[in-house]
Image (cartoon, rainbow, N blue to C red):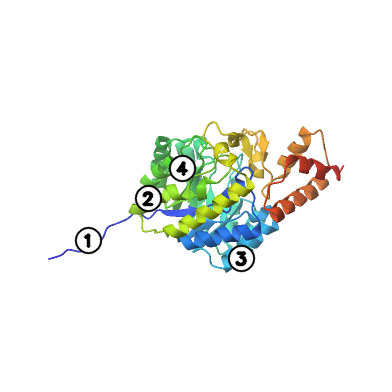
């Protein structure tokens, strides 16, 4: 007599961040068409959940999000923004689920919680990232997570934003925090010390619901956990199945973009500990938080911010009015999206000359 035994598999899912985090790779930028091509290739692999944009950064980010949502590329599409009502509105208008991140420095949680509650009224799933979890003592992190859950978040993301955690740290933090919340959980690990994959697998052992990844580990500074590496580590223990031929086509296409836009220097630049990307920032929100991120170089694309551009101009002894800075920033972002390339510092200086 045969007995049918059903294996109970972990429920952890991969959440792809190539189209948003990947765009923060130093020296990298994408056109709308290239973003949609990657989205299509991700869809072909069987990826079901993806964070695809930062709508408040530029109209192109809103446009590509609408196309992805309308085209039903993924079962769940998210777009990212600050925990501000203007960013929430920009995301909701695309039809996407809402992903919000805490400010890197804050004094009062009241407004953040109010804005999370505001987001929950938009009729979309809401996830909230408590950035840089390594800076918290565990009791404080639990307290903040419970507040976020009470405000109505469906998912809480626990990111190692500065890339300083070890697998032991990861297990210690998550084993304490996850048992205190009832909503779903997500992790996002940066690779500054080369431990992002190891940290993600440690989080998997703590039964986290979602693991953030990107193709080839693309991302801010030297990137985040690589999609193929994570899938290889968990595929025999989860219900999620990816098409390996489609995965190969995805990696081949992204590799051609890296080769064209950055070149082979990409592979040295993103090395843990010694790679020069560690001191390079692309995200305007990171550049503005200079007390959190130690950067001395900028890669300028659609995610650039005013603080970043003003600092570049300061280094060239240039100063323009706030109104001119806003116009210049828009010009820079438009050029980056149109070309699918970052804008060089000398180009920015030449552009700024017309505003003095």
To which residue does mark 3 refer?
67
Crowding around mark 3 (Cα neighbors within 10 Å: few <14, some 14 to 19, many 20+) is some
Compute the Cα span from label 4 to label 2. 27 Å
| Above or below: residue 80 compared with residue 317 | below
Compute the Cα span from label 2 to label 3. 31 Å
**Mark 2 vs mark 3: which is more N-terminal?**
3
Residue under the point 39% across and 39% down: 171
Q: Report the quarter where the N terminus lies.
A: bottom left
Q: Seen in the image, is 18 located left or right of residue 339? A: left
Residue 234, which numbered label? 2
Q: Nearer the viewer, mark 4 or mark 1?
A: 1
For the residue pair 147 and 329, the one nearer the viewer reads as: 329
Compute the Cα span from label 4 to label 1. 38 Å
Compute the Cα span from label 3 to label 1. 43 Å
To which residue does mark 1 refer?
5
Q: Position of residue 301 (x, y in %)?
A: 68, 48
**Mark 3 vs mark 1: which is more N-terminal?**
1
Q: Is residue 97 visible?
A: no
Residue 142, which numbered label? 4
For the residue pair 121 and 193, the one nearer the viewer reads as: 193
Q: Secondary structure at mark 4?
A: helix
Residue under the point 60% across and 45% down: 25
């Amino acid at each position: 007599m045969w007995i049918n035994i059903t294996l109970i598999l972990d429920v952890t899912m991969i959440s792809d961040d190539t189209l948003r985090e990947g765009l923060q790779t130093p020296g990298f930028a994408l056109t709308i068409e290239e973003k949609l091509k990657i989205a299509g290739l991700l869809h072909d692999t069987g990826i079901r959940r993806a964070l695809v944009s930062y709508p408040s950064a530029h109209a192109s980010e809103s446009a590509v999000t609408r196309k992805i949502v309308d085209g039903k590329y993924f079962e769940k599409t998210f777009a990212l923004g600050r925990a501000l009502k203007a960013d929430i509105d920009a995301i909701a208008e695309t039809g996407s689920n809402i992903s919000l991140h805490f400010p890197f420095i804050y004094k009062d949680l009241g407004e953040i919680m109010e804005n999370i509650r505001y987001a929950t009224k938009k009729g979309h799933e809401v996830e909230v990232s408590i950035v840089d979890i390594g800076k918290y003592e565990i009791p404080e992190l639990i307290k903040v997570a419970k507040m976020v859950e009470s405000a109505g978040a469906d998912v809480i993301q626990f990111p190692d934003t500065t890339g300083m955690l070890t697998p032991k740290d990861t297990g210690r933090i998550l084993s304490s925090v996850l048992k205190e919340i009832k909503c779903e959980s997500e992790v996002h690990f940066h690779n500054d010390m080369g431990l992002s994959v190891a940290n993600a697998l440690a989080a998997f052992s703590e039964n986290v619901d979602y693991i953030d990844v990107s193709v080839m580990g693309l991302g801010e500074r030297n990137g985040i956990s690589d999609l193929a590496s994570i899938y290889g580590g968990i595929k025999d223990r989860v219900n999620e199945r990816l098409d390996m031929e489609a995965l190969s086509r995805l990696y081949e296409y992204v590799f051609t973009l890296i080769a064209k836009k950055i070149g082979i220097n990409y592979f040295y630049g993103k090395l843990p500990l010694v790679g020069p990307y560690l001191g390079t920032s692309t995200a305007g929100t990171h550049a503005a938080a200079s007390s959190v991120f130690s950067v001395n170089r900028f890669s300028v694309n659609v995610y650039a911010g005013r603080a970043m551009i003003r600092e570049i101009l300061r280094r060239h002894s240039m100063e323009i009015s706030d109104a001119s800075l806003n116009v210049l920033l828009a010009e820079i972002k438009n050029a980056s999206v149109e070309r699918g390339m970052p804008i060089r510092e000398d180009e920015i200086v030449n552009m700024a000359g017309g505003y003095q």
